[in-house]
Amino acid sequence: MDKKRPNWESQILLADAFDVPEAMLVTHPWPNWLPDPDAEEASVSLNRRNFIVVTGMAAALPALAATPASATERPALVGTETVQYLQTAVLPLTTMPTVERQHVVPLLDSSLATVAGLLKNARYDTRTGVGLNQLAALLAQTCGWTRFDIGQQDQAGALWNQALAHAKAAGDRDMISSVIADFAYQGLWTGNAGESVLLLEGALARPMHATVRSLLHLRKARAHAALGEAASSRHHLAKSEAELARTSVGEPPNWAAWMSEADVEIDGGRCLIDLGEQAPGMKRIDRGLSLLTKPRSKTYAVFQTYRAEALVHEGQVEEAAAVLSSALGTARQIGATRCIDQVAQISDRLRGHLTVNGVEELLSDVNAVRAAS
């Protein structure tokens, strides 16, 4: 997404994910074609279609059955055993802690290329095609996060567009919602909270697992808070809490299994801080951090910076420096450039407090990281 709106290619992918006829992108310019979250699900058109040619480029969703290369040379048939093997070999890569996953990025990329290649060039039945598309969607989403974490926003967006297309081809609505939540999160990090709100409104117009709805409402609460819209932020934060507590049919998707009370507490705290309520915001963040499990080191680093920012605002410079030093160490360990940048930005606000314990050492460490990057 650019600063004002998703680019045309992204809009086409999003429209297809939302089952919005492509003509509406022209007759109802962004964001007017987005689905209404209050509309009945039955009003949403569910017809499947390919993409049209736009500005000279043909963009099409991966087909569930690939066309043979020629009439005389038919590709080998891919069966369910291949999909099962790929799932066994590849899925663990997508759930690795960031501190370990940073070492296998080339393997993730090659796995995505392999699965996407099968979808494009191989021959398979509908069931196998669905499995391959679901796997490709998850791999593309994970690969997108590896780029997002090191600040390569355009590459992250391109990979999430690919994930969106595969999720649509698989008919996996929860996965579509997950990718849209990723775009919304990217909007928060790039100062584009208004677009995040619009995307999430479209996503929430569709039925999905309660845990996924909780995640989308939480993202929307953050976006409204960033815009200073207190009532809307509180509304969606309460909805996130209610959805997380609600019993839903079936287990949540694997990619959403991390969503927990800790996330609601910490992001809820960040909402309050953005709305100027520092003390209650810090209280929620501290509670959330106490609930957070250790393997989520990247999440811990990000959430620590939220706490540090509130501490700086409250004038608790020494404690803020200690929290930022801890977050910087974690961010360096996991190779998350975006977390390092966040620590650096907050640390710059401490340059007028060099006599406070820990500040000079923190700034020296930040300068060393900046020089090395």
Image (cartoon, helix red, strand yellow):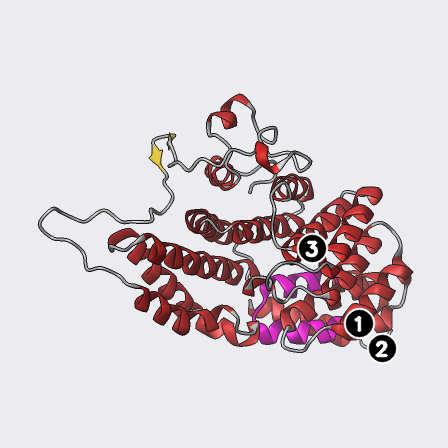
Judging from the image, what secondary structure is the residue with disc 2 in?
A: loop
> Are the two marked residues, 3 and 2, in contact with CB atoms closer than 8 angstroms?
no
Q: From mark 2 to mark 1, how far is it between C-alphas?
A: 8 Å
Q: Label 3 amino acid?
A: Ser
Q: Label 2 amino acid?
A: Asn
Q: Nearer the viewer, residue 358 or 302?
A: 302
Q: Nearer the viewer, residue 83 or 270?
A: 83
Q: Is residue 336 magenta?
A: yes
Highlighted range, magenta? 324-346
Q: Which mark is residue 29?
A: none
Judging from the image, what secondary structure is the residue with disc 1 in?
A: helix
Disc 3 target residue: 214
Q: From mark 3 to mark 2, how far is it between C-alphas?
A: 41 Å
> Left or right: where does residue 345 sit relative to residue 373?
right
> Left or right: where does residue 56 sit relative to residue 227?
left
For the residues carrying marks 2 and 1, which lies nearer the camera in this image? 1
Residue at image x 59%, y 68%?
371
Q: Label 1 amino acid?
A: Ala
Q: Residue 40 lies in what quarter of the image?
A: top right
Say whether disc 3 or disc 2 marks the residue closer to the N-terminus: 3
For the residues carrying marks 3 and 1, which lies nearer the camera in this image? 3
Disc 2 target residue: 357
Residue at image x 37%, y 32%?
52
Q: Nearer the viewer, residue 124 or 307?
A: 124
Say whether disc 3 or disc 1 marks the residue closer to the N-terminus: 3
Judging from the image, what secondary structure is the residue with disc 3 in?
A: helix
Disc 1 target residue: 321
